[in-house]
Image (tube, rainbow, N blue to C red):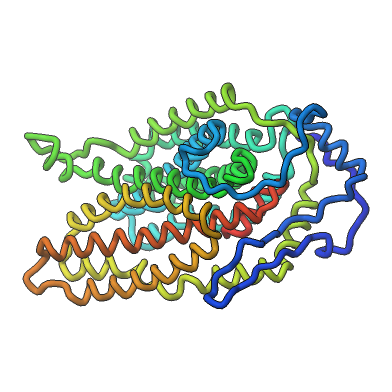
Amino acid sequence: MGAKPRRTKSPKTNGPSSLSTGSVRLNGNGNMNSHVEQRRKPAPLDSKQVTQNIMARESFSLDDPVPKTPIVNNHGFFELPIQDQRNFGLLVLLYFLQGIPMGLAMGSVPFLLKNHMSYSEIGVFTLASYPYSLKLFWSPIVDAVWSPRLGRRKSWILPIQILSGFGMLFLGSRVEGLMAMTGKEGGPSVWGFTGWWFFLVFMCATQDIAVDGWALTLLTPGNVSYASTAQTVGLTAGNFLSYTVFLAFNSADFANKYFRTEPIDEGLMTLGGYLTFWGWAYIAVTIGLALLKREEKTQNEDGIWDVYKIMWGVLKLKNIQTIIIVHLIAKIGFQANDAVTNLKLLDKGFGKDNMALTVLIDFPFEIGLGYYAGKWSQKYTPMRLWCWAFMGRLVAAIFAQFTVAIFPASGVETWYLLTVIVEHVFSTFMNTVMFVAVSAFHARISDPAIGGTYMTLLAT
């Protein structure tokens, strides 16, 4: 990518002892306080390398006043500085674009493949989603290799979005034929079809690393918690558009019922046309980003191997190991509710049309509540908010089981439909608050110098 050589190595330190270990205290009610710090120990103030790196920044000036230590602000979105509001909008747009291929690969396409492939072949297709779970392995490369001419994050985002755009254009021109012929005599293998979607998801996963790292520096330090709100709003909207909305407009029954006087066997939207539209949208946004958004240029600071060693040192921190254990066991209490409740409702006769209505009503609540969750994570400590939402999500799981148990013998009635909608909105609300809070916590403790790797490590 034309990256400049990394800096001369500084004197060696004794492994993880070069990492400062902050404190994560649990008080009596199980809440974590905000005094958390997980970052590399800075070099001595008289270090020549530190001086050179600071003076190399385009924003360096001896005329500026000495900056104060940043504190967390308790601002609503419209109280943020104009620059932060614009950068927040940019982050929402970038996360939204990531959600478009993800919603197709993990939702719509497997649903559409039921008419063309066996369940075993659909199982092979699910491998296309794996890059998102494995992106930690190449995140140090994204942090360490970049072009000073383009900027640290744009060096990755621009080419990735261009490749994704052309990939969607190419796939859009032939996806209908590929789905119809995959696995059949004379047609492509299921592995070849899966490979195209694997490529798109791999591009999205790599872009996610770069955007996560950029979010830590696009927003001012006191407002960095809004990065998690941008991620929630953008990814949720992109996934919803490519899954729920696309499947509705792709359905002939939906189109015939609400938009046509004479029924036909096709929906209002095809997968090929949808991919083609968003392929051009990707390219247009990339051109605009290249021309209109200027990223502060800095010198390369760490080589690839240096970032891998830093990541390993972070993993050795006891506080990070504690967070990892919490993440591993936290979902046990409501995993069954998330995976089974909707299926049990459908088995009892709730109906796909009622379920679709419930999801459609739930979407604006998820977007709006994501904003308030970000605001609350500014007012309260993020992990305290996460603990409150965790308890609420357990209550939501119990409420969901009660909802299934009281299913009317006479079928779905208005009062029961409203009960399911309330249960669904409440469960989604708790889930959104948990996600935004923990993402805000990750953003606060992550080191911007290796922001992509640090955020990916904590999220994975």
Q: Residue at x 91, y 56 (%)?
A: 12
Percent of width and height locating residue 294: 63, 27
Percent of width and height locating residue 402: 25, 75
In this rendering, would 252 be left or right of 338? Answer: left
Q: Residue at x 47, y 36 (%)?
A: 93
Nearest the viewer among 180 and 287 is 287
User: Is 156 located above or below residue 43 in the figure?
Assistant: above
User: Is 161 located above or below residue 319 in the figure?
Assistant: above
- Image quadrant containing the C terminus: bottom right
- Image quadrant containing the N terminus: top right
Q: Dividing the picture into quarters, in which one does residue 216 lie? A: top right
In this rendering, would 370 be left or right of 23? Answer: left
Q: How many marks?
A: 0
Nearest the viewer among 95 and 369 is 369
Q: Is residue 185 something one can see in this rendering?
A: no
Nearest the viewer among 425 and 46 is 46
Percent of width and height locating residue 421: 23, 59
Q: Dividing the picture into quarters, in which one does residue 51 lie? A: top right
Q: Is residue 114 something one can see in this rendering?
A: yes
User: Is 2 located above or below residue 103 in the figure?
Assistant: above
Percent of width and height locating residue 300: 78, 39
In this rendering, would 183 be left or right of 268? Answer: right
Q: Residue at x 32, y 70 (%)?
A: 340
